[in-house]
């Protein structure tokens, strides 16, 4: 008699991956409640879950950043959003602001006064950072590395370098309005310090702020560079002081002079600081509101922030806000271009 083998059609039992002592995965409702509750009230079934530990880490970080980010959104991002909205309206300061689309931007495109002011602002944004950063790096390098070689040191700063940093930084302590008033007196055509000195030697001084636009741009450039160069002297001095002396000693052993050391060692190692300063100075030059408004007569030249201020003064709030939006995007474009142009491989030391 043949034996019959019975085949079991039931599916094989599922393999469990739970290790001894491992808690089962919590249900979704309990997991959500545990995320919202303080850690001390977290159930045991959720506390040791991998997903909860990951969320708990980010919840800890969000607890510190939540309040500052809320203030930033309220006092920084919210005004930007409101300004962009009002740039598409005919708002004149009252409670009513009718949506008019791109009419303000079309008006701006056809406004020759806007383009004249934009030309001056872009010119300052291009030239002022180059001059200011060049002088800032030169003075900083002379302060940190321009002294005589001392025994046991590859490079040495000049005597009294701390005093020079204070002297260079002093314009940063002054108010921009005070700087504009003082330099307006210095550049005065009839009684200014510069033209008065030129008259002493029999030279007729030019009318710096009298009507020639090119001379007005030069005057604004001089004041901008003078007032900000001290900040970059201190900034670049700190960056150069962080470079290890061993690198300079190696360059000295290879026979590199001061100029070659600066361009081959110092400048590549502080390039990130230079790029940041370039962006900051360009934005400052794009602004230059107080200096031009206080120092330069109204008929000589205008920068875009001054043109914006005049539109606000005339009650054209919607049009003025659209000019501010253009300045915002111009500053962002300038920053992106500088970051793109100045992008280099990071050097670690």
Image (tube, helix red, strand yellow):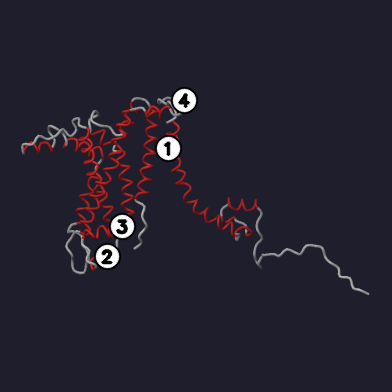
* Label 2 to label 3: alpha-carbon separation: 15 Å
Compared with residue 61, is residue 295 higher up or lower down, i.e. above or below?
above
Q: Quadrant of the C terminus?
A: bottom left
Residue farthest toward the bottom in the current orientation of the protein: 1
Mark number for residue 80?
A: 1
**From the viewer's perspective, is the residue at label 3 or at label 4 nearer?**
3
Where is residue 17 drawn, in percent x and y?
A: 67, 65
Q: Which label's residue is closer to the chain start, 2 or 3?
A: 2
* Residue 226 as seen in the image, left or right of residue 17: left
Find disc 2 in the rendering and name its residue: 245
Which one is closest to the eye, mark 1 or mark 3? Answer: 3
- N-terminal-most mark, 3 or 4: 4
Q: Find out whether the residues at labels 1 and 3 contact each other: C-beta distance under 8 Å.
A: no
Callout 1 crowding tier (Cα within 10 Å): few <14, some 14–19, many ≥20: some
Q: Secondary structure at mark 4?
A: loop
Residue 181 drawn at (x, y percent): 21, 36
């Amino acid at each position: 008699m043949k034996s019959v083998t019975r085949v079991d059609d039931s599916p094989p039992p599922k393999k469990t991956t739970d290790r001894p002592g491992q808690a089962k995965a919590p249900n979704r409702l309990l997991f959500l409640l545990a995320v919202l509750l303080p850690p001390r009230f977290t159930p045991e079934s959720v506390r040791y879950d991998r997903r909860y530990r990951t969320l708990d880490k980010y919840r800890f970080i969000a607890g510190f950043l939540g309040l500052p980010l809320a203030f930033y959104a309220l006092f920084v991002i919210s005004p930007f959003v409101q300004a962009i909205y009002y740039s598409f309206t005919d708002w004149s300061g009252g409670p009513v602001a009718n949506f008019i689309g791109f009419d303000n931007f079309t008006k701006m495109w056809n406004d020759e006064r806007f383009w004249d002011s934009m030309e001056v602002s872009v010119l300052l944004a291009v030239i002022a950072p180059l001059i200011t950063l060049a002088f800032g790096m030169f003075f900083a390098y002379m302060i940190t590395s321009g002294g005589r070689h001392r025994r046991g040191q590859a490079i040495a700063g000049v005597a009294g370098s701390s005093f020079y940093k204070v002297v260079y930084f002093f314009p940063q302590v002054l108010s921009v309005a005070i700087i504009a008033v003082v330099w307006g007196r210095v550049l005065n055509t009839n009684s200014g310090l510069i033209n008065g000195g030129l008259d002493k030697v029999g030279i007729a001084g030019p009318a710096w702020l009298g009507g020639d636009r090119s001379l007005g741009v030069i005057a604004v450039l001089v004041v901008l560079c003078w007032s900000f160069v001290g900040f970059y002297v201190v900034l670049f001095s700190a960056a150069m002081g962080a470079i290890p002396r061993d690198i300079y000693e190696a360059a000295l052993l290879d026979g590199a002079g001061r100029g070659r050391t600066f361009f081959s060692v110092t400048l590549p190692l502080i390039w990130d600081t230079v790029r940041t300063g370039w962006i900051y100075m360009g934005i400052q030059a794009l602004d230059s509101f107080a200096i031009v408004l206080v120092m330069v007569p109204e008929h000589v030249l205008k920068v875009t922030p001054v043109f914006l201020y005049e539109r606000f003064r005339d009650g054209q709030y919607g049009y003025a806000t659209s000019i501010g939006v253009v300045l915002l995007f111009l500053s962002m474009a300038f920053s992106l271009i500088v970051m793109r142009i100045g992008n280099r491989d990071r050097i670690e030391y």
